[in-house]
């Protein structure tokens, strides 16, 4: 079910990557917060690591997570979120 391993990083203004804490990723992954069934196939595995199923669209995941992190105050205005499939570093989606 969780066939894909995703890196979730906060990118600071200097361009440095910081693994998002598992607690923040877990907050997003709980359906009662996102209320979107497409994200049911997600599993927070560690700091900066989210395992997802094949049905989860990476681009949509990145947009939804960044929106959620901003609303929760996990990302500052000048920061951004990077969601990268670990086994395919070229599939990253950035705003």
Image (cartoon, rainbow, N blue to C red):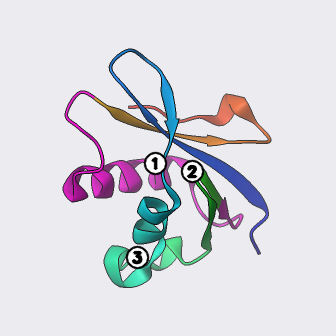
Going 40% across and 70% down the picture, which residue do you hit?
Answer: 27
Q: Where is residue 16 in the image (x, y as percent from the top left)?
A: 48, 21
In this rendering, the answer to whether 14 lies above or below 67 is: above
Going 50% across and 46% down the picture, which residue do you hit?
Answer: 59
| Secondary-structure class at tag 3 | loop
Instruction: Residue 71: name its quadrant.
Output: bottom left
- Tell me the quarter of the image containing the N terminus: bottom right
Task: Give, as a single range, the part of the protein colored magenta.
Answer: 51-78
Tell me the residue that label 1 is attached to. Answer: 62
- Tell me the quarter of the image containing the C terminus: top left
Q: Distance between the residues labelled 3 and 1?
A: 14 Å
Q: Does the magenta stretch include residue 94?
A: no
Density class for disc 2 (Cα within 10 Å; few <14, some 14-19, many ≥20) is: some
Image check: 64 left or right of 60? left
Tell me the residue that label 3 is attached to. Answer: 36
Circles 1, 2 touching at the beta carbon (< 8 Å): yes
Density class for disc 1 (Cα within 10 Å; few <14, some 14-19, many ≥20) is: many
Q: Position of residue 20 (x, y in %)?
A: 48, 48
Of 70 and 20, which appears nearest the observer?
Answer: 20
Image check: 53 left or right of 70? right
* Mark nearer the N terminus (3 vs 2): 3
| Secondary-structure class at tag 1 | helix
Rendered image: mark on residue 58: 2
Q: Where is residue 49 in the image (x, y as percent from the top left)?
A: 63, 53
């Amino acid at each position: 079910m969780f066939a894909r391993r995703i890196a979730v990083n906060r990118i600071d203004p200097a361009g440095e990557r910081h693994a998002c804490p598992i607690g923040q990723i877990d907050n997003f992954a709980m359906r009662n917060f996102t209320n979107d069934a497409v994200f049911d196939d997600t599993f927070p595995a560690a700091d900066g690591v989210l395992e997802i199923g094949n049905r989860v669209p990476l681009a949509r995941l990145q947009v939804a997570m960044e929106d959620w992190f901003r609303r929760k105050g996990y990302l500052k205005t000048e920061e951004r979120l990077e969601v990268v499939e670990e086994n395919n570093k070229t599939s990253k989606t950035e705003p």
